[in-house]
Image (cartoon, grey):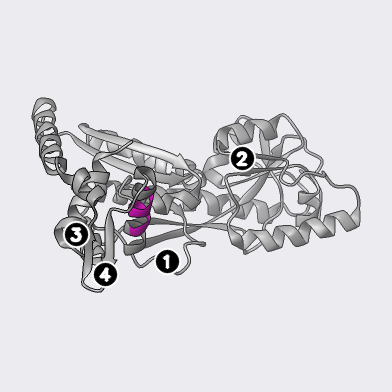
């Protein structure tokens, strides 16, 4: 099925005659534009352009597709204008994509802070695996992305990345868990139990977890499946942990409600490498709306509060490593 953005893509390439120029006009990275064009050609069953040293030339399939494309795009813009006039021009839409951990840690508090400041704002927050957030920003499906940025790697030339604070991560267990009061707790002790994984673990954890699992297997019986459960909802992960011997990695704000209710406890274990490195991303060259700028400011404030909560929990964990569960 064709989408309006498909027509915009083809019309812009046709007008510019060059993929690199079209990418700049659309505010896309060249790899993203190439992927979108290849996907569209696959759906249509044929090539739309012939590439050459002088640029690109349209095929007959392209000419057929674009015969009425500009008229369709003009009508869509006219419809958008009429809808905007009907609902009032003060209304604004903002789309935010966020990884599961940062969504629960600071994005939702930032969203709540927007209600009073921007009463006409329609805010859409989509929680997803952090590995998909960057692509939604590149594809202009989201205005802002918030995610764990450790694994963004080198391919960030088309993105503007604003690092936030590093948030300590902890392991949560049910109240009364066998590990809750164990002195000298190790990662191998922890990973011998069923692990609930929210989304996908950053690369910084993979090798360390693998080594700890080997140590656990050498030391005695371990839960065979690793992870035992993979789920995308932090709240459901915590409920699972509260009802079993499974463990889950959390930030302090994620655990706060269940911890105060007495359903879970935080294990007395932490290492300096155990943290989440969050950040805000946006497409390079894209001009953000005032609401997006205000949301970014609210997110920085929420991030600071979440960091303070994490530091307070970290202090309690460090003080209870002698073998007591972490007090609220």
Real-space CA distance between mark 3 and mark 4, rounded to the nearest whole angstrom: 20 Å
Task: Read off the residue under disc 3.
Answer: 25
Establish if 67 lies above or below 258. Answer: below
The reply to whether discs 1 and 4 touch (Cβ–Cβ < 8 Å) is no
> Which secondary structure lies at badge 2?
loop
Question: In the image as oriented, which residue stretches furthest toward the top?
Answer: 86
Please report the residue visible at 35 percent of the width from the left and 39 percent of the height from the top. 111
Real-space CA distance between mark 2 and mark 4, rounded to the nearest whole angstrom: 66 Å
Real-space CA distance between mark 2 and mark 1, rounded to the nearest whole angstrom: 41 Å
Real-space CA distance between mark 1 and mark 4, rounded to the nearest whole angstrom: 26 Å
From the viewer's side, name the closer residue of 25 and 231.
25
Residue stretch rendered in magenta on the structure: 34-39
Q: Earlier in the sequence, mark 2 or mark 1?
A: 1
Task: Read off the residue under disc 4.
Answer: 52
Q: Is 102 covered by the magenta stretch?
A: no
Please report the residue visible at 61 percent of the width from the left and 62 percent of the height from the top. 204
Graded by Cα atoms within 10 Å as few (under 14), some (14 to 19) or many (20 or more), the crowding at tag 4 reads few
Task: Read off the residue under disc 1.
Answer: 155
């Amino acid at each position: 099925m064709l989408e309006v953005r498909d027509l915009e893509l083809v019309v812009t390439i046709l007008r510019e005659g060059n993929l690199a120029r079209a990418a700049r006009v659309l505010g896309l990275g060249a790899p993203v534009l190439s992927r979108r064009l290849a996907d569209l050609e696959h759906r249509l069953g044929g090539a739309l352009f012939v590439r050459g040293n002088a640029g690109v030339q349209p095929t007959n399939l392209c000419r057929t597709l674009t015969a009425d494309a500009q008229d369709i795009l003009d009508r869509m813009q006219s419809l958008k204008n009429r809808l905007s006039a009907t609902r009032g021009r003060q209304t604004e839409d903002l789309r935010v994509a966020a990884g599961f951990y940062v969504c629960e840690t600071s994005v939702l508090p930032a969203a709540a802070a927007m209600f009073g400041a921007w009463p006409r704002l329609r805010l859409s927050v989509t929680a997803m695996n952090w590995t998909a957030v960057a692509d939604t920003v590149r594809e202009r499906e989201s205005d802002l992305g918030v995610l764990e940025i450790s694994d963004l790697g080198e391919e960030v030339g088309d993105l503007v990345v604003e690092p936030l604070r590093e948030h300590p991560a902890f392991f949560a267990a049910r109240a009364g868990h066998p590990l809750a009061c164990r002195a000298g707790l190790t990662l191998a002790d922890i990973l011998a139990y069923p692990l609930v994984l929210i989304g996908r673990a950053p690369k910084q954890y993979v090798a360390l977890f693998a080594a700890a699992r080997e140590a656990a297997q050498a030391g005695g019986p371990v839960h065979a499946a690793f992870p035992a459960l993979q789920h995308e909802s932090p709240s459901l992960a915590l409920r699972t942990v509260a009802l079993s011997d499974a463990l889950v990695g959390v930030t302090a704000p994620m655990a706060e409600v269940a911890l105060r209710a007495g359903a879970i406890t935080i294990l007395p274990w932490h290492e300096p490498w155990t943290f989440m490195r969050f950040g805000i991303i946006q497409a390079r060259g894209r001009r953000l709306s005032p609401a997006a700028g205000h949301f970014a400011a609210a997110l920085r404030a929420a991030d600071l509060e979440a960091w303070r909560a994490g530091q307070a929990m970290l202090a309690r964990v460090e003080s209870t490593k002698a073998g007591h569960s972490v007090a609220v």
